[in-house]
Amino acid sequence: MLNDFVKCLDEKLNYVVEEGISTEIRIWLRDIENVLDFSIKLEGTTYVVTINTQKKDEVSIERVFYEFVHIMEYRFMTFYCREKTPEYINFRMISATENANAMSLLLKFSTKESSK
């Protein structure tokens, strides 16, 4: 069902790829205390953001994600879903303007403690 919903959105939306989006993500993540490091890459029209946080618990990770949504989303429409794996908590996010211009993001939060 979820794949059908995303496929329907994909058919209706015009995914925009702009350097400004990557820049905004970098600026915002750089200033978050709980974020140790991150990487951003573009896969097709989806920004894939891998984030390593100091606090690995779900509540702390979700707090960073919800702050991210608040800052980055287009106000017309935002959809996201969550997937938990042994190594990551992933959020797929699609946000769009009234004109159907949209951005697609996959945020991958590491849940594994780094070994020192």
Image (cartoon, rainbow, N blue to C red):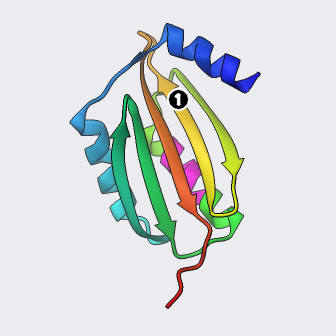
Residue 82 falls in which quadrant of the image?
top right
Query: Residue 56: where, in percent of width, then height?
Result: 62, 71
User: Would you place residue 46 above or below residue 61 in this image?
Assistant: above
> In the rendered view, does 10 fall on the left or right side of 102?
right
Q: Position of residue 11 (x, y in %)?
A: 52, 9
User: Which three-letter amino acid code belongs to the residue tagged 1?
Assistant: Ile
Q: Is residue 31 above or below residue 9?
A: below
Residue at 56% across, 52% down: 65
Which range is magenta?
Answer: 63-69
Q: Main secondary structure of the magenta part?
A: helix
Q: Which residue is mark 1?
A: 94
Q: Residue furthest bottom?
A: 116
Within 10 Å of disc 1 (Cα), the crowding (few <14, some 14-19, many 20+) is many
Comparing 82 with 42, the one in front is 42
Q: Secondary structure at mark 1?
A: strand
- On the image, which quarter does residue 5 sit in? top right
Residue 22, compared with residue 5, is above or below; it is: below
At a point 41% along the width and 9% down the height, the residue shown is 99
Q: Position of residue 46 (x, y in %)?
A: 42, 34
